[in-house]
Image (spheres, helix red, strand yellow):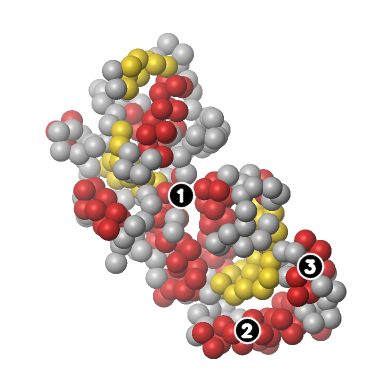
Amino acid sequence: MAPFTVTKELVAEANDVLLRTLLEKLLEAEARQSGIPLASIAVGGNQTAADGGVDGSIEWEGDPEPTGWLPRRAIFFQSKAEVMAAARLKKEIRPKDVVRPIFDELAAKQGAYIVFSTDDPSKSAYDERISAMTEMLADVADGDAVLLDFCGADKIARWTNSHRGVAIWLLGELGRPLGGWRPYGDWSAPGAHAQPYLFDDTARVEIDGVTMSIRDGLIAMRKLLSAPGGAVRLIGPSGMGKTRLAEALFDDRFDPATALVSSLAIYGDAGLELAVGPALVAEQLAVSSIAAIIVVDCPPSAFNRQTGCMK
């Protein structure tokens, strides 16, 4: 098993609030990876508030083509941390036996309706749920244009594991030990990554013998790390801002077209106790064919043994 792996049993432990937050993070990860504007995503707040049958949605026009976990350009999600058998599905789709208006909207858009649930149905139970959902839309004009799916605990685990940074976040929320590794966030200081990176136009960085501005250096490093097997080593005195610069590699407020996908980031400080060393983590991820960007803070004594940033 690859490191930091989420299982369906762990997904089943999520409550409604955590499950909805997981949905939001997965949609953001897919959007960043595919170039879909984050403004295309909407996820509700209070789980107990009336939501019209939609807890989360993503809608976009043009590229990219719908594929994988986002099979249509308009997708509505209903997030429920509970068993969602036919009777419960009917309550969501046809409250008081009246189909929700959202399905007319989805039919017009040829969109998708996906139940996102900690339920873990077998193949036959999954088929029964899809059949029941289909029957519930029988009286909707062009209802067959709506793609229906049921994303249970097993599918959610696989989706989460495709974004290793999201997987680490979920494991942390569920109280599972991470051995000192963390997802993208405040690596340099509390609240740091939420603030825009401040550029000093007089500062310079040297890459492969070429001296350039920090702005150009960030873009160059992003290009190197976006290629499989790319590696960047940041060398400089303690306190000069190397970790803050590493955070900025993922910040899409600066040149969003080149920003690295933050949901792929895994961070560890080699100066502290890491239960699994960077080299072994990288090897396990590579063997498992899992995309990730590993960022390692190294003390001076480790410079000749480990790289500061690896993919």
Reading the image, the residue beneath label 3 is: 107
Quarter occupied by residue 299: top left
Q: Looking at the picture, how far across and down is residue 15, in whole percent?
A: 53, 70
Q: Return the disc, 2 or 1, that comes first in the chain's sequence.
A: 2
The amino acid type, in three-letter code, at marker 2 is Arg
> With 192 as the anchor, is 89 left or right in this view?
right
Q: From the viewer's perspective, is residue 286 above or below residue 136? A: above
Q: Return the disc, 3 or 2, that comes first in the chain's sequence.
A: 3
Q: Looking at the picture, how far across and down is residue 259, in whole percent?
A: 49, 36
> With 98 as the anchor, is 159 left or right in this view?
left
Quarter of the rendering occupied by the C terminus: top left
Looking at the image, which residue is at 75% across and 70% down? Answer: 145
Q: Residues within 10 Å of mark 1 (few under 14, many from 20)?
A: many
Cα distance, mark 2 to mark 1? 31 Å
Q: Looking at the picture, how far across and down is residue 242, in whole percent?
A: 33, 29
Quarter occupied by residue 148: bottom right
Cα distance, mark 3 to mark 1? 32 Å
Q: From the viewer's perspective, is residue 101 above or below residue 136? A: above
Q: From the viewer's perspective, is residue 6 above or below residue 38? A: below
The amino acid type, in three-letter code, at marker 3 is Ala
Q: Secondary structure at mark 1?
A: helix
What label sits on residue 263 in the rendered view? 1
Q: Is residue 134 in sight in this rendering?
A: yes
> With 243 as the anchor, is 196 left or right in this view?
right
Reading the image, the residue beneath label 2 is: 129
Q: Looking at the picture, how far across and down is residue 17, in whole percent?
A: 57, 64
